[in-house]
Image (cartoon, rainbow, N blue to C red):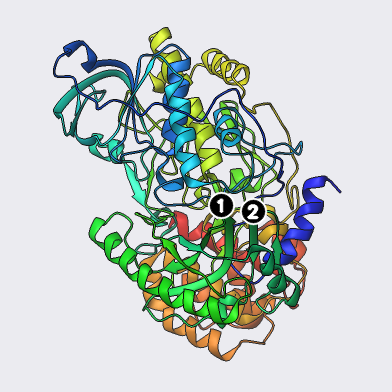
Amino acid sequence: MTNKNLLLALVGILLIGFSGVLAYKQFSNKETSTGHELNPAQPEPFDTTDDPATTDYEVIVIGGEPEGVAAAVSAARNGAKTLLIEEREGLGGLLTFGMLNFLDIANDSKGHNANAGIFNEWHELVGGKVAFDIERGKKAFLTLTDNEENLTVALDTELTDVQLNNKGKLETVTVKNAQGVHTLNAKRFIDSTQDGALAVMAGAPFFVGREDIGIEDSRMAVSPMIHLKNVEWNDIQKAVDSQKFGEAVLHSNVAWGFGKLHHMYEPVEEHTRLRGLNIARNSDGSVVINALQIFEVDGLDKEAKVKALEKGKKEIQNIVKYLRKEFPGFEKTEVASYPTELYVRETRHFEAEYQLSIIDVWENNDQWDSIGFGAYPVDVQATSVNDWGYVIADPVQYAIPFRSLVPKKVDGLLIASKASGYSSLAAGSARVVPTGMTAGQAAGAAAALSIKEEITFRKMTEDKKLIKQLQETLRDQGANLYKFNLDYSYEGEWFYPKIKKLLTWGLISGGYENEFDLEKEMTVAGFAKILRNALSRIDEDKFNDHNYRLLDIMGKEEGTLITRNEASRLLISVFGDNTLKGDSAWEEAKKLNLADKVLINHLKEEKGLNRAEAYYLLGSAIEKLEYE
């Protein structure tokens, strides 16, 4: 068993029962050092009034999120005159203003941090642990930018407009700050905002949430971080030992688990819930907790986010009362501060030259144009108080393709953020900050290279020689990047092609073990539930026609095992005659190609179905729905 799998076997046990964030697979509590000192100069106010030449840059990066810092630093290091624009008064975005200081770090197949390069430089500046001090994080981002002579940073500067030429190439952005309105030209642009603000202004196509798998108006919970003081850190071990709040782990500056809080804590505010705690300890003794979920919040609506943050503050007061009374170490705790913004997990996903898929993640796929790795579990957070979220898969590692950074329609632009060209399910893994900073570093280097070679990003996606040059540059500059060929669960099995269909539509999940328990017998209710979910995502008319019937079956047949003929009857009732029963239903399933030669050879007689067999039939039904 590899070190990674051994650790996952231990940690996975602790995480079952709540949809928390698997913060890391392996970490070090050792303080690390770096050549940079944390004494950055605050950028001067950005003003082009007296120097018109400053309106022309080679690369402009919009968004001072961690991904944007990595992109800007990388572009500057590779020789491009670069401008980084951020509307807040500091850098770090979600990690600093959202106070998300518990890092989602994962290992690659060799047991090393999957994400290195500029992310690693920043990580060393903040101490090299899983959790970091927020003010130290802000200074570390400024330190990285301050050390690049080709880089200008414009804080408190808002993007207001964009201009494209008649060929669809982004050429100009307009920004506004206290010094006035500025029109800025550049040869290349990078969008590293949380929601793709630059890309959407430029007209790049996108979808919101899980619209790509037929789920509209379904939004992952947003979270305000809970910042508390007067916490006796060592006393938290009592809660770990008692297991009163569920399995948990405590280390020198992080603790996580306590999944029973899902049910033990009673929220006051509507559409809120406390899940298991991810606790990060700061050097001043205060802690930041990622655990409060707020549902039904549109992450693209500023007013909705403001209201949600206020709701979160009220709920935090109730949480503090609960922790004081019930949780060891928090007897004297008080609110230290509130974050200025929410952790919004998901909004826009932009369509790219290659849309990274959940199958790429499940299969641990390498890509010819890989610019770095993802390795974090596919963590689909809860969307309502009745939903607990789930983990679809836990990859060993997979490649992020350069093509996934190149949006469709708009030229001269790369998107390096959680809004990059990932399917909504793949983004459950690829959205984490270390992977995003890897993408940002690649985007900066690619922008500088494309300028030097006078080639567009879209043409670059077809040029294997230039991509190889980009990969060599990234490796030379510290990125973790190499070719790999890894196995994956159920590879080569007779039923796997249909399993892929169910995975693609998010209808099944493998958890941290990448297992579907395929030998387990399938119930009628379970079969009907997956069929109903498939119809709701793929064919609205058929869903409306069969919804109540399937709900009725789910209610009445909860423990009944499904047979070959009954499964066939349920499927053909959707696609044809709902009066057929017994072997006649199976024969009709053959005619409708719901049962192909592979399944016919496997199911030669009437019998109860296991999950592999049932999933095969359902996968065939999904293919038919897709092509009708």
Q: Earlier in the sequence, mark 2 or mark 1?
A: 2
Q: Relative to residue 66, is residue 221 depicted above or below? A: below
Check contact, mark 2 vs mark 1: CB within 8 A.
Answer: yes
Q: Amino acid at mark 2?
A: Asn
Q: Quadrant for residue 10, please give it.
A: bottom right
Indicate left or right for 50 with 555 as reference.
left
Q: Quadrant for residue 438, please give it.
A: top right
Percent across and percent down for residue 483 are: 69, 27
Q: Residue at x 65, y 37 (%)?
A: 114
Disc number for residue 332: none
Q: Amino acid at mark 1?
A: Asn
Indicate left or right for 167 with 539 as reference.
left
Q: Residue at x 55, y 39 (%)?
A: 435
Percent across and percent down for residue 456 are: 37, 17
Q: CA distance from mark 2 to mark 1?
A: 7 Å
To which residue does mark 2 refer?
253
Percent across and percent down for residue 93 are: 40, 43
Q: Nearer the viewer, residue 470 or 212?
A: 470
To which residue does mark 1 refer?
282
Q: Quadrant of the C terminus?
A: bottom left
Q: How many marks?
A: 2
Indicate left or right for 624 with 41 as reference.
right
Residue 43 shows in the view: yes
Secondary element at tag 1: loop
Percent across and percent down for residue 142 are: 43, 31
Indicate left or right for 484 with 88 as reference.
right
Direction top: furthest residue: 453
Residue 612 shows in the view: no
